[in-house]
Every structure is written in structure tokens, then in C-alpha cells.
Image: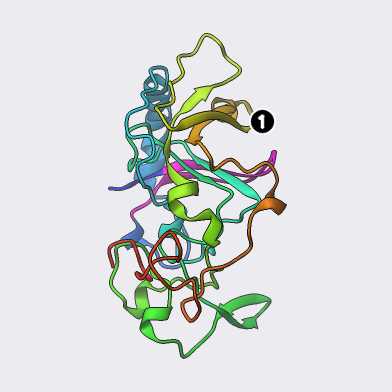
Amino acid sequence: MRWWPTTVSMNEDMTRVVHLGALPPQLTNDEAILSPFSTKHLLFITLLSGFTSAACESGGVGDPCIPEDEYKKNFNGHNENETSVESQSYQCESRICLAVKFRGRVSCPYGQPGGSSVAGVAMVAPGLDADDYCYLPGTKKAEENRVRVPVEPQLLDRSPDKAVYCSCRCDGPDKNRQYCDCPGGYVCQKLVDAYETHSRQKLIGSYCIKDGTQVGNTVEIDQTTCDSTGPTYGPRPGGCGLDKHPAGI
């Protein structure tokens, strides 16, 4: 059973979405479902995370991670106006996976275009080459593994190595808690301001981010996008990579 974390995405200082539960991606269709097993054990996992977070370690900070939302077929990607904090990512030693001012999907840098809309819902453009679709991370290029919604391409200036990686909380409002020390090359920056409910207060505070990648205002981000038919189709850092599906496909 693969546990899905508590995920909170913020648009500046407001909450966008929260996901709770345990969900093996291979058992889903197009939407997340919460199994009876996950409901039964959710409280235990939440309590366990509270105990472990009291002794936060900085090990693994900077390791790559794929946000768990990307294992959903109807997730169209992150937005560069947002910061997303995953508090129970099992890809990270610290359990924290950040997506800071990032656009699109880590696993599909060039995105996939939209076509017509059905009942007000945007659909993926038909007739693309198999290599030009987005797929669930780690799956084969098969129709049943395709992402079902349009996905915007990444921004060249906010590549995953600059914006999406494992981190740890280095400061917060509760001075009695133990926070991590950021390793060399990282700075402690406040990313999460406040939440409406007590259950999410543990996410408030600062996180270790790579020095030199700070964004003061979203308008400062270069809007050059990853285009597989243009000059950005090339190796990093000058391009967006030659692998259209850098997640094990």
C-alpha cells in the first residue's frame, strides 16, 4: 500500500487544496478515492508524523522529488504563483517535498496542449505522437497511463532542480520545537504564513531552499517556456532537457 501524504498548496498566503489519505495509483481511474484501509490508519499516520517532526533532520535536503499530485491523471500541474508543501513525502528523508514558484509537472517538462472542451472541461489535444503526451511518473507510454488534462510546459528559469526538491522546516512560530539547520548552499526562507485550521499549523514557517533561487515577486520570473520544437529543446541548463519524460518512463 502506498501512502498518500497530506498536501497543502498555497496561492501566496491562501490555501488552495488539501489531500488526505492512502491511495495506490494503480488502483485509480481518473480521480482519487479514499479506501477503508486508509481511513482506518490515517489517524495513526498523522500522529506518527507529529512525533517524527519534533526531531527534524536536514539529511536529504536538495534530493529530487516528484510531488504526489503528479500520480493523478487529472492534475494539470503547479502554478508559478504558488508554493506547495508536501508534509509526508516518502521520497524524502525529511518527509518534506517542496514545489516553489514552479509551473507544470516535473515528470513532463514540455507539457501537453489542450484541445476542445467537453461540458466546460478542457481536453487534451488529440492525434499527438506518443512521445508528446504526459504520462503518470514511472509508467509506460500507454493510453491508459496518459494524463487526462492539458499540462502547461515548465518555465526554463524555474527548472525542477531550482524549484522542486526535498527540504526541511528550519524555523516556525513555536520556538519550543526543534527545527533543522540548512546545509551549505541553502538559505532558510519563510514560505508559509498562516492557515485557517489548527490541524495545518505545523506547516507554518520557513524552509531550506537553494541559495540564489529566491523569487521576490513572480513577475521577476522569465516566462520562456519549454518547447520541444524550439531552442529550449536541449540539455540543461540552457535547455529543458532531451528527455520528455524524466520520471522513469
User: Which quadrant holds the C terminus?
Assistant: bottom left
- Please identify the residue farthest to the front as the structure is shown: 238
Residue located beneath label 1 in the image: 193
The verdict on residue 18 being magenta is yes
Task: Work out whether residue 43 or residue 229 is closer to the camera in this orientation and state it.
Answer: 229
Q: Among all residues in the image, which is located at the extreme bottom?
A: 127
Nearer the observer, 11 or 236: 236
Judged left or right of residue 160, residue 131 is left
- As shown in the figure, which amino acid type bears the numbered disc 1? Asp
Q: Which residue is at 68% across, 76% downward?
A: 120
Q: Position of residue 183 (x, y in %)?
A: 39, 27
Q: Secondary structure at mark 1?
A: loop
Q: Is residue 91 rendered to the left or right of residue 17?
A: left
Judged left or right of residue 171, residue 137 is left
Question: What residue lies at 50% left-to-right and 79% top-to-bottom?
Answer: 230
Residue 75, placed above or below residue 207: below
Rendered location of residue 176, percent (x, y): 52, 8
The answer to which of 14 and 241 lies nearer the viewer is 241
Picture residue at 61% right of the left edge, 56% below the top = 79
Rendered position, 23 above or below 122: above
On screen, residue 119 above or below 159: below
State whether the magenta stretch is mostly helix, strand or loop.
strand
Q: Is residue 88 magenta?
A: no
Span of residues in magenta: 5-24
- In the rendered image, residue 182, in percent from the top left (x then y), is placed at 44, 25
Q: Residue at x 44, y 65 (%)?
A: 240
User: Crowdedness of circle 1 by 10 Å Cα count: few (<14), some, many (20+)?
Assistant: some
Q: Say which of 210 and 105 sits in front.
A: 210
